[in-house]
Image: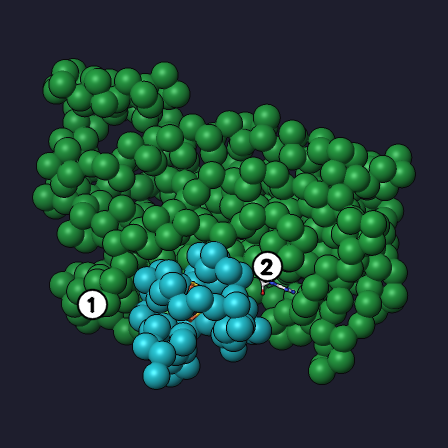
Amino acid sequence: MKPEYDLLVVGGGPGGALAARTAAEQGLSVCLVEKRPAIGVPVRCAEGVGRDLLTEFMDPDPAWISAEVERAVLVAPDGYRITLEPSMAGCEVGYVLDRKRFDRDLVMQAANAGADIQVKTRAVAPIVKNGAVAGALLEQQGSVSEVLARVVVAADGVESKFARWAGLETAVPLSEIETCVQFLMTGIEIDPGATVFYLGNEVAPEGYVWIFPKGDRTANVGIGISGKKCRSGSRPIDYLNRFIKSSFPEGRVLEWVMGGVPVCRPLERTVADGLIVVGDAARVSDPITGGGIYNAMFTGRLAGKIAAEAIGRGDVSADGLMPYDAGWRSSKLGMALERNYRVKEYFITLSDEKLNRLVHSVSQIDLAQFSVLGIITELVRQDPSLLLELRAIRKLL
Amino acid sequence: MLLIRRDICGYCGCCVSVCPQGALELIDAYLSVGEDCTGCGICARACPLGALEVADEA
Ligand SMILES: Cc1cc2nc3c(=O)[nH]c(=O)nc-3n(C[C@H](O)[C@H](O)[C@H](O)COP(=O)(O)OP(=O)(O)OC[C@H]3O[C@@H](n4cnc5c(N)ncnc54)[C@H](O)[C@@H]3O)c2cc1C
Ligand code: SF4
Ligand code: SF4
């Protein structure tokens, strides 16, 4: 580790890896630090990602693809199921990744591009000069050293502290954290080509149960519920145990995965003087699905690019880095985040009865035209009294 | 005072993200709580496993 770099990246997840790789490719000197002793473990993810989204960054490698997904199944609270095929808009073909290998591969790409990598190295405080972030204090093997950087990228995930230390407000409201538990299970009867989502206030209040296939008779089976619904005796672990007892009593659990997914709006500001915040740390995961792999990679790549430009111009102030904030907000991703936030705010108000009607109505839509708008239109046709409630989100779709 | 049941904790960081004080920190597999903890209990609500508990001051 050198005492000074152009760019210091805090966190070795997909966001940090893409920031480091992109900046190193632009010729910056880069150091990525990860507090854990290994990249990618423990996993905190259901590992699902859209194929088209992933191929925006790189060619898929069989080494880190556990399964290819061709269908999505939606299960209503009353047990009614519909299957969405990829010919329908809104249902994309996807992969279930092996994130232990995927995350490591991304960091390896950053290393191959020239970035320095330091694992078991934790950022413990920003170095602040004239009010601007100018590096970080890094703890490694019991000693703390100063590392200066022209720009720091906070890619420190859901448990992000770095941006907060630098003065940004980052706490996620309890009602806007999805608290999750997942088991990697084997020996279970599943459709290896389908992701399955169970909806309902009994099964997962303000969230859902998922089954993401990981190969033959093996899957990530997990649940996320709203933090405000989480109490002693009705925590994600309790819901998941109940679900598995009734659905997969024969299954064997190979791994526990826990975690939180922010479903709030993104940080109000994702830049400060000398600082860019990306991925889960910036709270840019999708408020409906909780998906954040692509979002972290997208914001990470943009951060690497904008940091290189700003350093080239000699202006790493918040204003100089603002094209990053403005860039992701005005992107397709940024607009989808805002729209999906508002749709989520509506969906969490739905009773099981309305959720049933919603899923049933999907089966009656011309499936070639399947879209969120199609479902909503059908719902309103069946129950015009919903129009009033739906008006707020309708113009968003 | 915040009690951390280390036999239950899965060191996932969910609690860290909701603490309004920024009092929690995850050091790899070890969750630590700082002095600025007010005992509000928000983190205990969010924990997926139930590893946190606010104990009454003695
Ligand atoms: C149960 C669950 C299921 C999910 N399922 C999906 C899914 O199916 N599809 C999807 O797209 N997304 C999913 N997500 C979300 C996805 O995992 C995250 O959005 C994604 O990992 C965010 O990437 P990131 O790089 O921002 O952060 P992370 O991947 O969390 O990486 C942050 C890294 O920073 C390190 N770090 C933190 N603080 C410091 C420090 N001070 N110093 C050094 N290093 C530090 C951490 O150890 C960590 O390795 C899921 C999340 C959970 C919890
Ligand atoms: S939320 Fe619970 S399991 Fe996760 S780190 Fe905090 S105490 Fe541990
Ligand atoms: S009790 Fe409140 S202040 Fe203390 S660690 Fe938990 S959330 Fe933070």
How many marks are shown on the rendered structure? Answer: 2
Q: Residue at 21% of width from left, 18% of height from top?
A: A388
Instruction: Supply the letter of whichever chain is cyan.
Output: B
Disc 2 residue type?
Answer: Lys
- Give the colour chain A carries in the figure: green
Question: Which quadrant of the rendered structure holds the C terminus of chain A?
Answer: top left
Q: Which mark is residue A12?
A: none
Q: Which mark is residue A161?
A: 2
Q: Earlier in the sequence, mark 1 or mark 2?
A: 2
Left of A347 or right of it: where is A43? right
Identify the residue under disc 1: A233
Q: Chain of mark 1?
A: A
Residue A298: image quadrant is top right
Mark 2 crowdedness (10 Å alpha carbons): few <14, some 14-19, many ≥20: many
Percent coordinates x, y for residue A79 in the rendering: 12, 45
Residue A358: image quadrant is top left
Disc 2 is placed on an element classified as loop
